[in-house]
Image (spheres, rainbow, N blue to C red):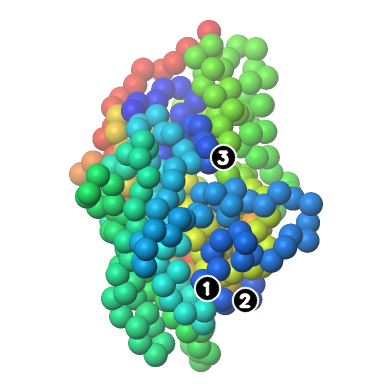
Amino acid sequence: MAETGGVSAVEDLKHETEVVKGETIKSQSCNGITPEDMPSSDTPDLRSILVTSVLNLEKLDADLYRGKHHWVPRSQRLFGGQIIGQALVAAAKSVTEHLFAHSLHCYFVRAGDPRVPVLYQVERTRDGRSFSVRSVKAIQHGQPILICQASFHLQQPSTLEHQFTMPTVPPPEALLTVEQLVQQYLSDPNLAVKARQGLNNILAGEVPIEIKPVNPPDFYRHIAMEPKKLFWVRARGHIGEGDMKLHCCVAAYVSDYAFLGTAVLPFPEFRAQFSASLDHAMWFHNTFRADQWMLYECESPWAGGSRGLVQGRLWRQDGVLAASCAQEGVLRMMKTLPESKL
């Protein structure tokens, strides 16, 4: 679905998959991925909807689960981050409490239908002394829509340790949320009616994560930018230290937001006729809390053949690299005429 004008730029900050409305640490224990098993909250914040609803699966049989939807995208395709997160939840329920996720690799093979639930079928591919591998099929209408392989391992000491240096950026406390940026755009009396309607729709959406862009794109996308993007992100509501596997599942959900759009930043004169994720990979390096601010560093090293490749790093506020991500997606673009503000 093509987007024009400033609304598209702001929606890229919200998330990349054209979603507008929603229904929607040290502990290494792993199987308690339901709100009942989480420790009681020590804060007045409401429990994150990502815990209580979005990533809370219904068990149907051994290694078989059902997930409901919490977004109704305009593209009539399910949000990929939700399917990845739910698949990882299903996989995590099948391993022992001493193992936690260190990587996942997913292929999106069909568009998800928002009208029906998704079944998650887990195959226990291998259980070793240090590593366990699980294969998960997300199924609708009798056919897989996503194939995911996740690997879990026992934490072990290492004599080899290194990481990149976290980018130097303003702290989240010094930046505006996407909602606050939208309010600023709405204060412009010359804003086009169509753009104003789109921005109000964005404010009406119940997004379960908070985003604070470090380098928000030009509202009307008049300026070509490097294919790089930085923003602080965290789950709305309280999760707590709890289960590290749950935080990994939430991070998998979060990792698909505003990701693929990084590849189109150098081309302000084009809009997407069609965009969709083809695959998604993630590696978990250190413990973290998904309900605390993390810096998402995204960059696109290549685009061509109506596809784009993006890579990302999730950093804890203390400079520790928490996770790395990669994704390729379809990007079919069209050139658009400049939109008047009148």
Give the quadrant of the N terminus: top left
- Is residue 134 in sight in this rendering? yes
Q: CA distance from mark 2 to mark 3?
A: 28 Å
Q: Looking at this view, name the residue that lies furthest to the top.
A: 342
Q: What is the x, y in percent for residue 313? A: 49, 61
Q: Amino acid at mark 3?
A: Val
**In this rendering, which labeled residue sits more in front, label 3 or label 1?**
1
Q: Nearer the viewer, residue 242 or 101?
A: 242
Name the residue at 38% across, 74% down: 151
Name the residue at 73% across, 46% down: 174
Q: CA distance from mark 2 to mark 1?
A: 9 Å
- Is residue 301 in sight in this rendering? no
The numbered mark, 3 or 1, whose residue comes first in the sequence reads: 1
Q: Looking at this view, name the residue that lies furthest to the front.
A: 61
Looking at the rendered structure, which numbered label has been put on residue 207? 3
* Mark 1: secondary structure: loop
Q: What is the x, y in percent for residue 100? A: 48, 75
The numbered mark, 2 or 3, whose residue comes first in the sequence reads: 2
Q: What is the x, y in percent for residue 117? A: 37, 45
**Quadrant of the image occupied by residue 135:** bottom left
Q: On the image, numbered disc 2 is attached to which residue?
A: 27
**Quadrant of the image occupied by residue 238:** bottom right
* Mark 2: secondary structure: loop
